[in-house]
Image (cartoon, grey):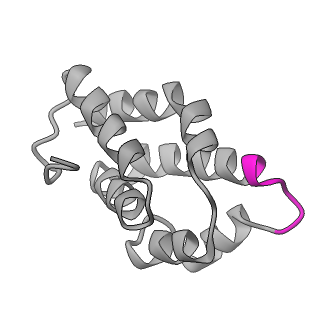
Amino acid sequence: MADQRTAISRVIEANAVHIVQSIIVTPLFKAHLIQRQVFTTEAAEAIFKGSCTESEQLYAMLNCLRKRIVETGCEVVSQFLKCLEETGHGHLSTSLYRQMREAEINVGWMQEVGE
């Protein structure tokens, strides 16, 4: 399973620029990250602190997400993709899901996304 976590982290890393350019940070987006337990309230507040640009915040979010994947497992990715779908970023969620499947990552732990 550790190999799966590393492979998923690599897909996130490889798509970092696309993710940062695609996500619009809104209060709803932040709330969904916390509600879906992608991040704790404290972690989300630290990531989305006001002194950073939105791009810097999103890169920080991705770095934290990649660490969480390695430390806690694949479920956090499933919750992140659901968060994207629920906040108007379904195209991004579907793209990441398909890339994970194409990378031969076993996505059986994740409910079908965008299909």
Is 111 placed above or below 8 here? below
Numbered disc total: 0
Question: Furthest-top residue in view?
Answer: 103
Using residue 90 as the reference point, say whether residue 39 is left or right of it: right
| Residue 83 coordinates in the image, percent (x, y) | 39, 63
Nearest the viewer among 45 and 6 is 45
Instruction: Name the quadrant of the N terminus.
Output: top left
Question: Furthest-right residue in view?
Answer: 51
From which residue to which does the magenta span run? 50-56
| Residue 90 coordinates in the image, percent (x, y) | 36, 52
- The residue located at (14%, 49%) in the rendering is 112
| Residue 100 coordinates in the image, percent (x, y) | 28, 31
| Quarter of the figure with residue 51 | bottom right
| Quarter of the figure with residue 82 | bottom left
Q: Examine the structure image and report whether residue 104 is included in the region drawn in magenta.
A: no
- The residue located at (35%, 51%) in the rendering is 77
Is 33 placed above or below 59 here? below
Is 6 placed above or below 75 here? above
- The residue located at (62%, 42%) in the rendering is 20
| Residue 52 coordinates in the image, percent (x, y) | 85, 57
Question: Furthest-left residue in view?
Answer: 108
